[in-house]
Image (spheres, rainbow, N blue to C red):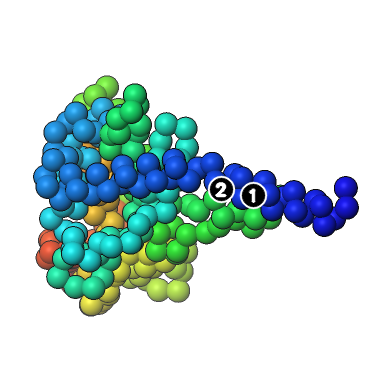
Amino acid sequence: MPINKLMASVLFMGLLVQAIPGGAQNDDLRIWKEFVADLQAGKMDHPSRIRPYYPEFQGPMQGYLEQLRAGIAWDKLKSDPEVFRVGSQIHYVVALPSVGDERELSAPFCFTFLVENGRWYFQHMETIMIRMDKLGPLPATSFPDVPAERKAWMREEIEISDQVRLFAFLAKDKGKDFAFSWFRDGAGYALAARTWVPFVRPERAFVLYLCWEFAHRRENPVTLEKLTDSEALVRITPRWFELYERAAHLKPQITPEDHRRLFETIWHDRANNAGWGLAISYEGEACLFRLTRPNR
């Protein structure tokens, strides 16, 4: 086929493909606008309006919708979302303006709806999206990425989810005392600090390694405020607690009290194995590690 006819055919087919979903896309936008109106009016709080991926997500998803309802600057919500239909699901990608300033609420969000028998149901809400819809032609050697901060969140969500799942399994099978003791990995952590930071005394190496790990491996805000041979003060804003509030799958597996106790158990054991006593306190989102040793 001559190249000009081939290009004309491709163009025609492209126009045809775009023309087919036009009506469907209008219907998809209608669903989005109905959702926005119902959310604003407080009509999304009934469980029958939500069909989550798993039943245990029902409560968290209702809570997230209530937070959104209170946090969205409705008068600034003007743009239509990107729309992706996948089988019986519709995904809407949209930035949401927040109340009180011009910033956006963790933009962009991906809202997922399930359509069954002509009715739509809210299913999921997510702020992590890997835009593989933008993948180039094959063979591909590079792939769409996400911002570094989002990847750091993903790494910690995977790690903490594994820890919580294991804790829940052990607590059910062996009891909570056994489950907490399983996570006392202080001997190995103290050895890692001593061998990976070999240029200072072991007790200082522990504090410095702790700061390095939070800053670079976990990418959490951390400030070393004081360090002597007998005392150290480290201020951290760990994702550990924010993840619990934002990740729907954690709350059904562990109580907030046990989630905090697990965090503190891990760090008390690590500090003790490095020869430090540790007192943990909280100031808003910040976590303060006060480490002390006998005067030498």
Query: Label 2: which residue?
Result: 18
Task: Give residue 177's mark.
Answer: none
- In this view, the residue in front, 151 or 36, is 36
Q: Quadrant of residue 104?
A: bottom left
Residue type at tag 1: Gly
* C-alpha separation, residue under disc 2 versus residue under disc 1: 6 Å
Task: Give residue 14's mark.
Answer: 1
Question: Which residue is depicted at the point 17% across and 31% down?
Answer: 47
Residue with the most extreme right position: 2
Residue type at tag 2: Gln
Q: Residues within 10 Å of mark 2 (few under 14, many from 20)?
A: few
Question: Which residue is depicted at the point 50% across and 53% down?
Answer: 131
Q: Position of residue 70 (x, y in %)?
A: 13, 55
The correct choice, above or below, for 124 with respect to 148 in the image is above
Q: Residues within 10 Å of mark 1 (few under 14, many from 20)?
A: few
Question: Which residue is depicted at the point 40% across and 63% down?
Answer: 149
- In this view, the residue in front, 85 or 205, is 85
Q: Quadrant of residue 249?
A: top left
Q: Position of residue 209 (x, y in %)?
A: 38, 65
- In this view, the residue in front, 12 or 230, is 12
In the picture, measured across the screen, residue 151 lies left or right of residue 53, that is right
Q: Position of residue 262 (x, y in %)?
A: 22, 44
- In this view, the residue in front, 146 or 152, is 146
Report if residue 164 is visible in the image: no
Marker count (numbered): 2
Determine whether label 2 and label 1 are within 8 Å by CB: yes
Question: Which residue is depicted at the point 19% across and 53% down?
Answer: 68
